[in-house]
Image (cartoon, rainbow, N blue to C red):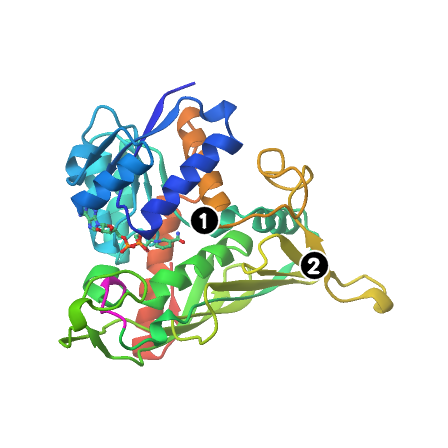
Amino acid sequence: MARVNIGIVGGGLIGRTHTVGYHMMKTFFAAETKDVHLRMIAERDASLARETAERLAIPEWTDDWRKLVSSDQIDLVFVCVPNDMHREIALETIANGKHIFCEKPLARTAAEAKEIADAAERSGVKHGIGFNYRKAPAVQLIKRWIDEGRLGKIVGFRGSFVQDWGLDATGALSWRFRKEIAGSGSLGDLGSHVLDMSRFLVGEISQVAGLLSTHITERPIGAGGLGHKAEGGAVKMGKVDVDDICDVLLQFENGAQGSLVASRLASGKKNHFDFEVYGMKGAVFFDWERPNEVLLSTFDTPNERSGFTRVLTGGFDHPYGEALWPIQGMGIGFGETFAVQMYEMVKAIQNDGSANPNFRDGLRINMLCDAIQKSAETREWVSLG
Ligand SMILES: NC(=O)c1ccc[n+]([C@@H]2O[C@H](COP(=O)([O-])OP(=O)(O)OC[C@H]3O[C@@H](n4cnc5c(N)ncnc54)[C@H](O)[C@@H]3O)[C@@H](O)[C@H]2O)c1
């Protein structure tokens, strides 16, 4: 089995989550990943890099990502830094012939994403993108049912991914509130996951109509991730130039229609990602707050028993059941989706296959985000080729 030495660039929220995914992968997929090793971390905050490497027994650390992406010791690079750095790091990683996994969104704009996706495809390296919610066994089960035709022709999709940390107006003007770094706000951060889910389950999206708004228009200047406070009681304010809330109507190529909402101002909602898919023979409902279950309705069920039935996922009959927990309902969480995601990326390298989703999907999501922003500006539907 081919050696796959992994390097992670970025030690923030999602860099840490990939280290969790790595350790879970080594446990759940032990035999297939014995030659896979997390070898190096690059993080611009040197003390965080050192501390992470020491704590997790990662052999090497650096505060210069170029050292990681050019190291002979590294075969696969995970890009886990803010969106403005994806392009530069990805292009250099690809130029060095290394396989690459990039966090979502692939880039700030479709133009940047196209440069990255084209470079990856030209070079022949394997490329994957971090739409991890696809990897929940419940979502894979829904996909299986749709592909088997159990829901009939799909006609409708509704999805929402909403959080409430943005309601704190004293939260720092972190990179997530700055267009030059993030590209967009709730749209690219949360809406991109819903767009990916809808494409995965329903099909390609051909037209969008978007409505975006920003309600907290300035915030204290400061660093930090999700809702971190500005340091030292800073009072200097900076402008928020991305969306807090985003609503979108979706037209799919196959005739289905749908809608999505993404928001950072949804009081009481912490990491609330749910969706419904409606077919002519049945429907499903999934709520990430209950990641071990799918609600399924089939229209031919006699009236006295009609409605949604709860199917508890996991165990041998369901996707990933052999590898993850052996009994239904034992518990799937955020970490498991990262374990499966990393495992599938490694398998794409070892078996000379394709990662799924990959940079082509990432590009399409960036194209959709651009189209949604254009639609919100012009107040007109925007078509994609
Ligand atoms: N898949 C998901 O569910 C999910 C969730 C959160 C974030 N993300 C994505 O992950 C990426 C990172 O987000 P995050 O939440 O971890 O952000 P974060 O702010 O928590 O962490 C980013 C880290 O990158 C480091 N960094 C910045 N520039 C760097 C550079 N040039 N070299 C090395 N390190 C550098 C920062 O010091 C920080 O530690 C973003 O693209 C985001 O959209 C994905």
How far apart in space, not on screen, are marks 2 and 1 (Cα)? 22 Å
For label 1, the residue is: 132
Q: Mark 2 is on which residue type?
A: Leu
Instruction: Give neighbour class at mark 2: few <14, some 14-19, many 20+ (Cα, 10 Å).
Output: some
User: Residue 107's spot in the image, x, y percent?
Assistant: 27, 53
Task: Identify the residue at the far top of this view.
Answer: 1
Q: Residue at x 51, y 52 (%)?
A: 200
Is residue 247 highlighted in magenta? no
Helix, strand or loop for disc 1: helix
User: Residue 122's spot in the image, x, y percent?
Assistant: 27, 35
N-terminal-most mark, 2 or 1: 1
Instruction: Describe residue 152's horizontal placement relative to residue 189 as left or right.
Output: right
Look at the image and give the residue range highlighted in magenta: 171-176
Provide the major secondary structure of the magenta segment. Answer: loop
User: Could you tell me if residue 8 is visible in this image?
Assistant: no
Q: Mark 1 is on which residue type?
A: Asn
Residue 223, quarter of the rendered image: bottom left
Marker count (numbered):
2
Instruction: Describe residue 2's horizontal placement relative to residue 292 as left or right.
Output: left
**Is 35 placed above or below 336 here?**
above
Ligand 1 within 8 Å of the CB at mark 1: yes
User: Residue 266's spot in the image, x, y percent?
Assistant: 44, 75
Instruction: Describe residue 345's horizontal placement relative to residue 151 as left or right.
Output: left
In which quadrant will I find the C terminus?
bottom left
**Residue 88: mark in rendering:** none
Q: Residue at x 19, y 44 (%)?
A: 47
Instruction: Give neighbour class at mark 1: few <14, some 14-19, many 20+ (Cα, 10 Å).
Output: many
For label 2, the residue is: 296
